[in-house]
Amino acid sequence: MSAALTVLYFGAGLLFTAAALLAVVRIVRGPSILDRVIASDVLLTTLLLVIGAEMVINGHTRTIPLMVVLAATAVFGTIAVARYVSKQDKPGEAVPDVEPDVEPADGGTK
Amino acid sequence: MSFDDILDLIAAICLVLGAFLSLAAGVGLLRFPDALSRLHAATKPQVLGLLFVVTAIALGARSWSTLLALLPVLLFQVLTAPISAHMVGRAGYRTGNFRRDLLIADELEEAVDEATAEADAAGEAVEDRGVGPAPTQNT
């Protein structure tokens, strides 16, 4: 019984490790800053899940507050970078349709 | 095999499922061609994977109060994941960070065209306002 549990725990650990490594690869290689932001978001989510998995494996519940704080604040970094990108990259790389001013995109997102 | 063993086994299986979703996101990040497709892959573990892990924690601790303490985690994630995905998707569209040949339909383009025509008709005043305070009220 406990052997089966050990195998399952090891499997979960391996999958988490592979996921984190793939996210790091995308952070390093990502052609645009948006790819990097998305990948770092995935890395953070993986970290959140790993913290939870560690609680199950070691049989304690001490790091629940850490999970709450991570889940609540993870969004800020992404939003900050996304805002920055949408302002900064517009003149150079924008699709011609979106170019003129901010009003069109505002109407479009509704 | 006692009841405790079964609960432990279910918790471990939930962990593996959550880890698998995480791995799926990693593989999607690496294999998908543009930022918007990668965004699709990235959102898989954020809600369902977390749900699996939270279930595993509650089963491992065998207590309802632990589940109650974990509800805010799920709640925050469910509330904030769409916000960040929306912001990234919006930035991705506006910076042209996607492959147009992969799109089947682009309804946003029509809306943008309409709004652009309206703005042009309204003339210079709107354009001045556009570079000013408009971005802040945009979010």
Image (cartoon, rainbow, N blue to C red):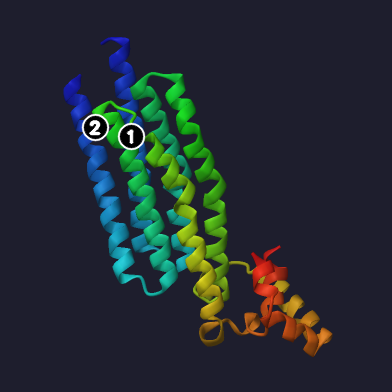
**Mark carried by residue B92:** none
Residue B77, x across and y down, in percent = 50, 45
Residue B24, x across and y down, in percent = 36, 50
Is residue A99 rendered to the left or right of residue B29?
right
Can I make out residue A75 in this image?
yes
Q: Chain of mark 1?
A: B
Q: CA distance from mark 1 to mark 2?
A: 8 Å
Q: Same chain for labels 1 and 2? Say yes or no.
A: no
Q: In the rendered image, which residue does mark 2 sit on?
A: A8
Is residue B21 rendered to the left or right of residue A60?
right
Residue B128, x across and y down, in percent = 73, 86
Q: Say which quarter of the image contains residue B129.
A: bottom right
Residue B81, x across and y down, in percent = 52, 51
Q: Amino acid at mark 2?
A: Leu
Circle 2 packing at 10 Å, graded few (<14), some (14-19), many (20+), is: some
Above or below for A68 versus B91: above
Residue nearest the observer in this picture, A19 or B28: A19
Can I make out residue B34 in this image?
no
Q: Chain of mark 2?
A: A
* Secondary structure state at the residue bearing disc 2: helix
Quarter the N terminus of chain B occupies = top left
Q: Say which quarter of the image contains residue B105.
A: bottom right
**Residue drawn 42% across the image and 72% down it:** A33
Seen from this angle, which residue lies furthest bottom?
A: B124
The answer to whether the residue labelled 1 contacts the one labelled 2, judged by CB atoms less than 8 Å apart, is: yes
Q: Amino acid at mark 1?
A: Leu
Circle 1 packing at 10 Å, graded few (<14), some (14-19), many (20+), is: many
Seen from this angle, which residue lies furthest top?
A: B2
Is residue A105 rendered to the left or right of residue A70?
right
Q: In the rendered image, which residue does mark 1 sit on?
A: B15
* Secondary structure state at the residue bearing disc 1: helix
